[in-house]
Amino acid sequence: RRSSSNSLISGQPSSAATGIFHFMAVDEATTLGAMRNGVAAIEEEFEQHGTEDDKECLRYVLYGRAGESDRVFQHGWRRDEGRNGEVLQDFVDHPCSRAAGLSPAHVLAARLYTTIAFLSINRQLRDLKRDEAGKVLDPPQLRQPHKMPATVAFLSDALKRLRAANTELQRASYVRSKRGRGRASRKVGVAPKSNEDQNGPPNQPGIDDDGDEEDEDDEDDD
């Protein structure tokens, strides 16, 4: 069955409770055991189950410098174009990675997903069990166990950590800006602009740290 990039598969909240390992149709204890090996677990999965392109991307991310590869992919796309020759450890040391508590394995999985290797990861994630009518089962689960479960688990955990860290940064930024507005208001003897200043940040999508509306295209880089 062919999948469409325009279709969205969603389920009930109970689906999320079953976890990433159930979704991938793999044994949780076995995968967690492999993940204790960190980067080596991802290397092993790519060497055993990756395509030649996947393996080349693994070597590039692990040992190369960002933007210094001359290889060209579809539509003339080059990896990390405009980068400054960073190595993997530079991304591990990035303030966002540190704030999220990312390990080298987390960063490796995330970096690999920005390469053509994402195809090998995604194709398996779209092959879901369906009922006789062709509807995806709830909770969803892959028809076959994913061949790169440690890579997917590290990637999933990295995204959760980054999302949580970003939320904290946004809250801290709001508190600082609120305090600044409060001091300015007291100094000139005027009240805050609106009730939003009293009650907290508006819980609205599409608003960035600066209060500007984000472009819809920025929400999904994939």
Image (spheres, rainbow, N blue to C red):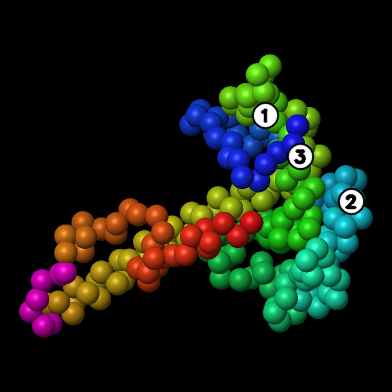
What residue is disc 1 on? 141
> Helix or strand or loop: what does disc 3 sit on?
helix
Instruction: Identify whether 41 is placed above or below 125.
Output: below
Residue at 63% across, 24% down: 135
Side (left or right) of 178 relative to 142: left
Which residue is disc 3 drawn over?
A: 124
Given the image, on which type of amino acid does mark 2 rest? Thr
The residue stretch that appears in magenta? 187-193
Instruction: Name the residue tied to disc 2.
Output: 51
Kind of residue at badge 3 = Gln
Q: CA–CA distance between discs 1 and 3? A: 11 Å
The correct choice, above or below, for 83 with respect to 201 in the image is below
- Whole-percent x, y for residue 217 in the image: 53, 61
Q: Quadrant of residue 126?
A: top right
The quadrant holding residue 117 is bottom right
Dominant secondary structure of the residues highlighted in magenta in the image: loop
